[in-house]
Amino acid sequence: MKNKINEIAKILSENYSSLPRISVKDGRLGAALFLSSYSDFSGEGQYNDLTEEIVSEILEDINSGYVSDTLGKEMADLGIFLSYMKDQDLLDISSDELLNDLDVIADDFVDKNIEAQDFDPFTGFLAQGYYLLNRDTQVSRDAILKIVKAISFISIQDKDGHLFWKSPKFSNGGIYTGITHGSCAIIQFLLKADLKFKFDDTIKKLIVNSIDFLLKHKLNFEEYNFYFPTKIGEEVVKTPVEWCYGDLSIGYTLLNAGLHLKNELLEKTGIEILENTVKRTDPQNYIDDASLSYGSAGIAIVLKKALLLCDSPVLQTAYHDFIDKTLKHAKSVNGFAGYQAFFYKDSTEINLGFMTGLSGIGLAFLAHMDEKYLPFTCFLYL
């Protein structure tokens, strides 16, 4: 594994400039996130120097009028990245003044996205919210409060008083369940916000009522061989086992919520979902991919995070299996350390990126070698 990590570092250091975006998801910040951690892991200081160079280039781009259709998300990514570098003692960058500026920028985007009723963590106010949770300023506290109020305001109540949200990312306004565009993205944010700011019972009611909506739509596993559809209200289609949609992130969210709410039954439900999900061994249940978003690295990382919350031999065994599968996925003859994305397989951005390529796969390997690198999962809303 160490040889593969070294190979990934070499490829990213030589090719990061081919990533035009700033973002963590598919841009230079994702590469920088891996390279800074790799520098700490390997003791090779030139990779830290390279990370500083990447950050300087990004700041120059911004000062030169950087334009992007996901600017709000990318500015939030920059803020989370700088906060992460400081908290993990990975990069010595004087960033206090810049972070204060990013607080104000994030607050402006929060207002715009609340007006558009866009909560999505990739396009809406949760993108800024996850950044602002890293901050402790008056601007950030006020903005988080606005976000919590907005989550409540735009929620939809079913006949039983349970809460859900229609995704603004898709034209049909689908009711998504997972951690990327749906209920779990909101629940995970509310859990983190309550943990930090100790809100009154209002936020706990939001969490409980949204969890009750999910559980109301939980399927019989023995009949369907999975628990939750990607979208509610449409024909039930089996969701692959992956980080971004379906049972894995939902199981983790329910486990996390059960511990936060001191609800033992909910905690056990989350563990049961996770344990049964990893028993879906038929290859048709998986996308042939090693990435964080859709593949084995993302599955492994969710399991590793879950194992910090519970003691499960089933999940422990599955975690090691999926890490091993991630290593064995490197079987293509290409310039990406043998890895090839399942979707857009010839795209350099996709194959080098954090969510879908080498940057994220490399970080999963680093976290396996040393848990000190596991906090990178904040970029996965875990």
Image (cartoon, helix red, strand yellow):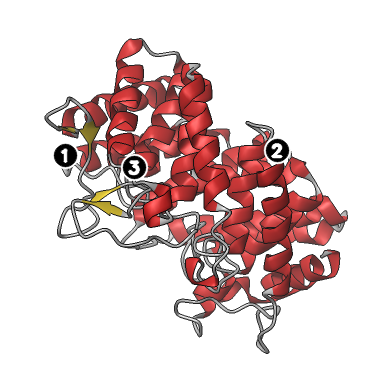
SS under mark 3: loop
Distance Cα–Cα, label 3 vs label 2: 38 Å
Question: Which is nearer the N-term, disc 1 or disc 2?
Answer: 2
Return the residue nearer the eye: 222 or 114: 222
At mark 1, the secondary structure is: helix
Residue occupied by mark 2? 88
> Most extreme residue toward the bottom, as rendered?
333
Q: Amino acid at mark 2?
A: Gln
Q: Which mark is residue 218?
A: 3
Kindly identify the amino acid type of the residue bearing the numbered disc 3. Answer: Lys
Q: Left or right? Give the position of 318 relative to 39.
A: left
Residue 76, position as x, y percentages in the image? 44, 45
Position of residue 277 measured from the top left corner of the image (x, y, whole percent)? 52, 51
Q: Nearer the viewer, mark 3 or mark 2?
A: 3
Return the residue nearer the eye: 319 or 292. 319
Q: Check contact, mark 3 vs mark 2: CB within 8 A.
A: no
- 279 to the left or right of 202: right
Q: Residue at x 34, y 58 (%)?
A: 70
Q: Is residue 252 above or below residue 55?
A: above
Q: In the image, residue 302 lies at what x, y percent?
A: 58, 47
**240 and 345: which one is in front?**
240
**Which residue position is annotated with label 1?**
115
Residue closest to the far right: 43
Q: Is residue 53 left or right of residue 47?
A: left
> Where's the N terminus, which quadrant?
bottom right
**Gap in Å between the C-alphas at discs 3 and 1?**
32 Å
| Quarter-of-image position of residue 281 | bottom right
Which element is circle 2 on?
loop
